[in-house]
Image (tube, helix red, strand yellow):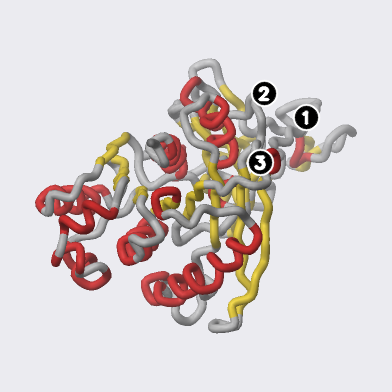
Amino acid sequence: MFFFLTVFFLTDIPAVISGKQQQTGGPPPFARVTSPEFNKDGTITFRIWAPEANQVKFQSAELLGEQSDIMQRFDDEYWRITVKPVRPGKYRYKFMVDGVQTPDPVNSLYIENSSVVWVPGKETEFFSVFNVPHGAVHRYFYHNPAIEAVRSVSVYTPPDYDHFPNREYAVLFLLHGSGGTDESWFRYGHANVIFDNLIAQGKARSMIVVAPFGHTVEPGSHGWPFVQEQGDFSQDFLEILMPFLNEKYRISKNPENRAIAGFSMGGYHTLKIGLNHPDQFAHLGTFSWGGGKKFFEEQARHVFDDPQKTDENVRTLFLACGRDDFLFKRAQEMDQLLSELDIEHSFFVSDGGHEMANWRIYLYEFAQLLFRE
């Protein structure tokens, strides 16, 4: 569900007398700008009121590309920047005002601590809300005594889940990257909307989608970054989370009806857990991640020892990465390694980099491969 805020502006340029703004009634100064503003040539202009600032920067690698992030002052108290046209999609951005991050004060669309701009187009239709049956997303908290932590997980149930109380459902576990949470796939990735549309179109089977919280220590605390916490997450996922979910949902126990996928850090989690538990997962998807020979030797040695067995156990092995992703070379190396081992897989290559705009596409493609007869 999306919320839109309509703001009425008296003017985009405030009156100034003797270097000071003249208050003429109406909205306060911060609300007298339009931001973002879509221009006829496809460019987008962002503005912010920051009268005392010495420097304001615009933060969004996806929108800026190679363009400078320095915003220009205008009318003494305001700052603006115009970015070049971008492909349709949903993009995060922030302002950096004298070193302090802030979302856009006049934009009501946001996710976590970032503002969001939606660039419409045909390419966004697969994650746009239409008049189709909709599933539900619930969020739960549970306790893991092994690490003395309260954990969180978000769960999507398909539109027909309550209509068939005796049916067991296929399940997809969706894992986030090092900068995300259990809500990332639904709040920003719109995974629930993607599945609503795919199921309504008959392109994907009706399934439960589970998005757990991947960090077992707080980012920035002792033991982080994520490479030092993998054992904890595997323990939490297999020993605590899955039994917790099995009590609440009618999840199929057949590995043929169970999948796991994730982007970036979640791709690491996917292969480490999925390859080592073929009795639980027959479908694996890694988005914007790549593991070389060292990864397989340390985390899944049996893939080298008996690649034919791995090929038999894994029904779907889907790799995806963008050409501009900093992990693209590693993804290529993993693709080559799997080919050398004669393990059947697919490698989906897109434009773009390490971004949710791509991960939505990869999920859309991967979902259509799952649980087919």
Q: Which residue is mark 3?
A: 164
Residue 352 percent location from the top left of the image:
35, 38
Mark 1 vs mark 3: which is more N-terminal? 1
Q: Is residue 9 above or below residue 47?
A: above
Residue closer to the observer: 260 or 92: 260
Residue 268 visible in the shown view: no
At mark 2, the secondary structure is: loop
Q: Which residue is mark 2?
A: 131
Q: Is residue 97 above or below residue 120?
A: below
Q: Looking at the picture, which amino acid does disc 2 mark?
A: Asn
Residue 321 percent location from the top left of the image:
31, 44
Count neighbours of disc 3 (C-alpha within 10 A) and say few if under 14, some if 14 to 19, many if 20 or more. Answer: few
Tell me the CA gap for discs 2 and 3.
22 Å
Judged from this view, the residue extending furthest toward the right is 25
Count neighbours of disc 1 (C-alpha within 10 A) and say few if under 14, some if 14 to 19, many if 20 or more. Answer: few
Judged from this view, the residue extending furthest toward the front is 166
Q: Using the image, tell me which numbered label, if any, was put on residue 6.
A: 1
Q: What residue appears at the point 17 percent right and 52 percent down from the top-left corner?
A: 338
Quarter the C terminus occupies: top left
In which quadrant of the rendered view does residue 272 lie?
Answer: bottom left
